[in-house]
Image: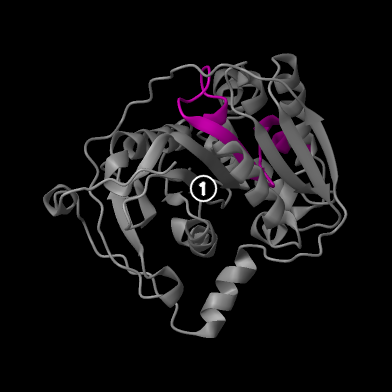
Amino acid sequence: MRTAVTVSALALAALVIAPTAVHASSAANAASASSQAGAGAAGKSASATEASGNGKKGDPTPTPAPSPTPTAATATDPLLQSVSVDTVAYGPHLRQRMDVWHQTDGLVRPGVFLIHGGWWSSGDKKQMTAVSRSYVEQGYTVFTINYRLSGEAAWPAQRTDTLDAIATARKHALLWAFDPDNYVVVGFSAGGHLSTAVGTYKDGLPGLRGVVGISPVISPITAYNEGADTLDLNSRKLRESAIRLAGGCEPAKCPKIWNSMEVPLHASRGDAPVLTFHSDDEFVSVEHSARLQERLARVGVHMTVRTEPGTEHSSPMYRLPGVAETVQAWIAAKLR
């Protein structure tokens, strides 16, 4: 049952930084949002493997940022008349920002955190605009996260930023009528590395109900090895990107950093269940998810790994017929 809450204008105004408007001025724009959400009833055949179990969540202690400073702006899209978007600073760096898409009716809603990809070295939360629309329309409060890129800070800054963004959202949940104990984290490509990294942080994040990765780079060691002797340019680039994430240091010289980056090594019984998607011929191989699935199975945590035919990666993967619908149904089942 959703509960209505009221936040004073003064409380929200104290956190404002700069306006962020939501515009959909044409049918083409709305159609683009629908397309990026992955709408399509006729799904391609997919294979899935699962490992099941349950685990009690622990209580990790990421360092929350100082009070955030969002902006409130009412959407002009007729489909989103009751939606506002707040841009929140969860830390002092310009990349430590997130957009909060929330309904203005005061009903408490579960949350969906979205993390963009881009080789850890590029990308922006704006890439998640269409996907954000799709989830807020389904009744969730949506958080799209920016984080420090590898050219600005080496690992574990990216994981730390994601944890701090989540901690900030939970601390100030009342501002956006968000249930801080009922959320999922969804990441694309390098963002899938971060979603699974926070999902396996310590003994599980409080309130986290599920983790989704779309073409997730779960195993930087796998990326490093697969990119060593190949003519595939994307595989080679991913290898170099993983080295850059590690501060320019290769695994043999910096094993502690690479072990910290390697998500499967951090699986524990308190972790949230996981769903991942890969194409069967893309440069981020399904081996990434297989490694995590095997580790989670050891500790009794449920993980589903699905593969689709083709080479699509990240957002193009999400737009394949049936993929977004599968993800949305899985999320709905996890969030009560």
Number of marks drawn: 1
- The residue sitting at 14% across, 49% down in the picture is 14
In magenta stretch: residue 199: yes
Asked if residue 29 lies left or right of residue 235, the reply is left
Asked if residue 11 lies left or right of residue 175, the reply is left
Image: 306 above or below 24: above
Image quadrant assignment for residue 317:
bottom right
Asked if residue 230 lies left or right of residue 129, the reply is right
**Closer to us: 243 or 130:** 130
Residue 222 seen in the figure: yes
List the residue tagged with mark 1. Answer: 115
Q: Quadrant of the N terminus?
A: top left
Q: Identify residue type, mark 1.
A: Ile
Which element is circle 1 on? strand
Image: 332 above or below 53: below
Residue 154 seen in the figure: no
Q: Quadrant of the C terminus?
A: top right
- The residue sitting at 36% across, 33% down in the picture is 167
In magenta stretch: residue 185: no
Image: 78 above or below 305: below
Over which residues does the magenta segment extend? Answer: 198-226
- The residue sitting at 37% across, 53% down in the picture is 100
Pointer 1: residues within 10 angstroms few (<14), some, or many (20+)? many
Q: Position of residue 144 (x, y in %)?
A: 44, 51
**Closer to us: 92 or 31:** 31
Q: Position of residue 209 (x, y in %)?
A: 55, 32
Q: Position of residue 50 (x, y in %)?
A: 80, 31
Image quadrant assignment for residue 286:
top right
Q: Position of residue 272 (x, y in %)?
A: 59, 27
